[in-house]
Amino acid sequence: MAKDVLVVLVTCPPDKAQAIADALVEERVAACVNVVPSLHSVYRWKGAVHHEEEAMLLVKTTKDRFEALKLAVLKHHPHELPEVIAVAVDRGHTPYLEWVIESSH
């Protein structure tokens, strides 16, 4: 069961985080989204180093919903190339994992 669950990392502008989180849950591509309101990102983009204040979305979903989740992020995210990175869950509290699976569909 744990092998069916993913945590997906999505960074975004802080002022867009709540709207993206709401959309992902409302569209049933995520069971839950935690909004970490503030982090500082340093990255290279188009040959230059950038520094940005961002929010981190920790999205809980299932492997079979990942493609739909990715499309939803791309639809709602303002950046040209948003971060959407899935991390497989190895273990977890079984009732919680069951809830993630049920709520993502």
Image (cartoon, rainbow, N blue to C red):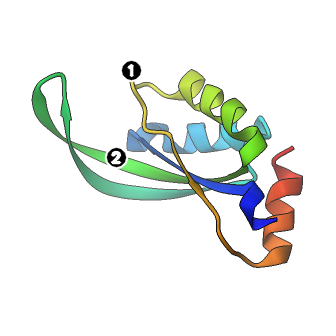
Q: CA distance from mark 1 to mark 2?
A: 15 Å
Residue 90 occupies quadrant: bottom right
Mark 1 is surrounded, within 10 Å at the Cα level, by few (under 14), some (14 to 19) or many (20 or more) other residues, namely: few
Q: Residue at x 44, y 25 (%)?
A: 78
98 left or right, relative to 84: right
Question: Which of the two discs, 1 and 2, labels the residue nearer the N terminus?
Answer: 2
Q: Residue furthest bottom?
A: 93
Horizontal and vertical percent for residue 55? 40, 50
Quadrant of the frame with the N terminus: bottom right
Q: Amino acid at mark 1?
A: Glu
**Horizontal and vertical percent position of residue 39:** 31, 56
Instruction: Determine whether the residue tagged by mark 2 lies in a helix, strand or loop.
Output: strand
Percent across and percent down for residue 30 are 72, 47
In what element is the residue under mark 1?
loop
Mark 2 neighbour class, 10 Å CA radius: few under 14, some 14 to 19, many 20 or more: many
Q: Residue at x 86, y 65 (%)?
A: 98
Q: How many marks?
A: 2
Question: In the displayed structure, would residue 34 be above or below residue 18?
Answer: below
Name the residue carrying label 1. 80
| Disc number placed over residue 10 in the picture, else none | none
Q: Looking at numbered disc 2 in the image, what kind of residue is underneath it?
A: Glu
Q: Which residue is mark 2?
A: 54
